[in-house]
Image: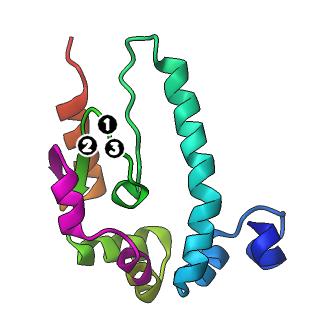
């Protein structure tokens, strides 16, 4: 990434400044495509490696794929979508991650629509409650008893 965008995307310690990257890529579809071309193959390779490690076990593998629709992953045993109104998502990005409302809306506008995500879902979890309440719901619903 630094080869493409230079030191402007690095923080003082030499790590990735995610906001600097966001400022570049969410304002320009070509730059976003370039970022996806860099990141998605590496992430896909790592997911494949980790799944292969667990293939001979009885482990349940849950993949947290923020861009599931856009990435084209198919053949999964099931898809769980946490659904939330886009205005709530914007507020959470602003209050919880320090984004500006404009930045949050730019990011959301570059993602699959709510209806596209819901169409792919085998199970929909209502994400409208607080993050803490959502965590409790998921814990109660998806943790095996006994």
Residue underneath mark 1:
76
Q: Image check: 133 left or right of 2?
A: left
- Of helix, strand and loop, which one carries label 2? loop
Q: Is residue 84 visible?
A: no
Q: Image check: 34 left or right of 91?
A: right
Q: Is residue 76 visible?
A: yes
Please count the marks in the image.
Answer: 3
Discs 1, 2 touching: Cβ within 8 Å:
yes
- Of helix, strand and loop, which one carries label 1? loop
Residue 71 in picture, x, y percent from top left: 43, 56
Nearer to me, 70 or 133 = 70
Mark 1 Cα shell of 10 Å, populated few (<14), some (14-19), many (≥20): few
Mark 3 Cα shell of 10 Å, populated few (<14), some (14-19), many (≥20): few
Residue 82 is inside the magenta segment: no
Residue at 52 percent of width and 23 percent of height: 52
Query: Magenta residues?
Result: 106-125
Residue 79 shows which numbered tag?
2
Applied colour scheme: rainbow
Nearer to me, 9 or 138 = 9
């Amino acid at each position: 990434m630094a080869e493409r965008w230079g030191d402007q995307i690095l923080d003082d310690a030499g790590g990735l400044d995610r906001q600097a990257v966001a400022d570049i890529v969410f304002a320009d579809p070509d730059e976003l495509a370039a970022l996806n071309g860099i990141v998605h193959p590496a992430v896909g390779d790592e997911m494949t490696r980790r799944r292969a490690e667990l293939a001979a076990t009885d482990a349940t593998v849950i993949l947290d794929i923020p861009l599931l629709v856009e990435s084209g992953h198919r053949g999964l045993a099931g898809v769980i979508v946490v659904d939330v109104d886009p205005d709530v998502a914007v507020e959470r990005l602003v209050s919880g991650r320090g984004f500006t409302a404009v930045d949050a809306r730019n990011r959301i506008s570059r993602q699959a629509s709510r209806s596209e995500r819901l169409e792919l879902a085998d199970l929909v979890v209502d994400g409208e409650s607080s993050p803490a309440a959502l965590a409790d719901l998921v814990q109660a619903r998806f943790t095996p008893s006994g």
